[in-house]
Amino acid sequence: MNSTRKWFEAWGEAEAQNAFLRMLLFGALLGLVTQVAALTFLALRPPILIGLSSKSTEVLSQKEPAREILELEVRRWVEGYVTTHYNWTPQTIDTAFQKASNYVSQEQQKAFWAANTTQLKVAKDKGLSQRFYISSLKLDLDKRRASIEGERVLVVESLRAASIVNLSLSFQLGPRTVENPEGIYISSENLVDGGNQ
């Protein structure tokens, strides 16, 4: 700084430099905010899926599955639920019921656990095992109902008891998740013992 200059000239020059630096800082911050907003927008967009085959390349869109595919998916889902919920040993019953609860709608979770708590305790206390074999499965997609008939085999130590069981499930379509990729959830379940064989 030139010592022969008046103090107000030096002050004015420093003020001009500060104003220039503030403008640079504001521009850099504005650029940074714009980049963060753009990156956030791009990161939150759903991915574009492209299907390749020997005949064509096309963008895959999420749409409701055809009725035939939905019926196959519901049938597979019902079989998965029944297999998970009704096949267990005293050592695996906790895991089986936990997996089965992923098939139940959020509104029915409390009722599901209330209905199964006694069975859970009895199975562990008495060393009870259960197997369920599906003999028929009828679906009504319009009413969102599934009727299952099967044979339930209960095993206590070496004693076996078999009975015919009718199971009626009401279900609803919901969001697809990692735990429930089909997006089908039980809204009610009725188990009717058909008598011993």
Image (cartoon, grey):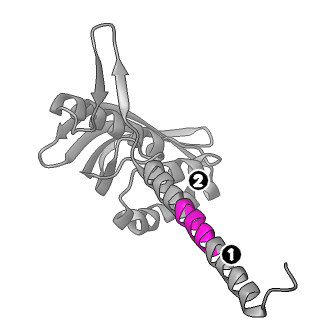
Q: Is residue 132 above or below residue 36?
A: above
The image shows residue 197, relative to residue 187, as above or below, that is above
Q: In the drawing, what numbered circle is on residue 17?
A: 1
Q: Residue at x 28, y 23 (%)?
A: 58
Above/below status of 29 relative to 13: above
- Residue 131 visible within the image: yes
Q: Secondary structure at mark 1?
A: helix
Does any portion of residue 197 appear in the rendered image? no
Which of labels 2 and 1 is toward the front?
1
Q: Name the residue rendered at 66%, 72% in the picture.
A: 21
Three-letter amino acid code of the residue under disc 1: Gln
Q: Which residues are magenta?
A: 22-32
Indicate left or right for 4 with 33 as reference.
Answer: right
Tell me whether circle 2 and circle 1 mark residues in contact (CB < 8 Å): no
Picture residue at 65% right of the left edge, 79% below the top = 16
Mark 2 Cα-neighbour bin, 10 Å: few <14, some 14–19, many ≥20: some
Outermost residue toward the right in this view: 3
Q: Quadrant of the C terminus?
A: top left
Q: Is residue 132 left or right of residue 194?
A: right
Give coordinates of residue 22: x percent, y percent: 62, 75
Q: Which residue is mark 2?
A: 94
Residue 24, by quadrant, is: bottom right
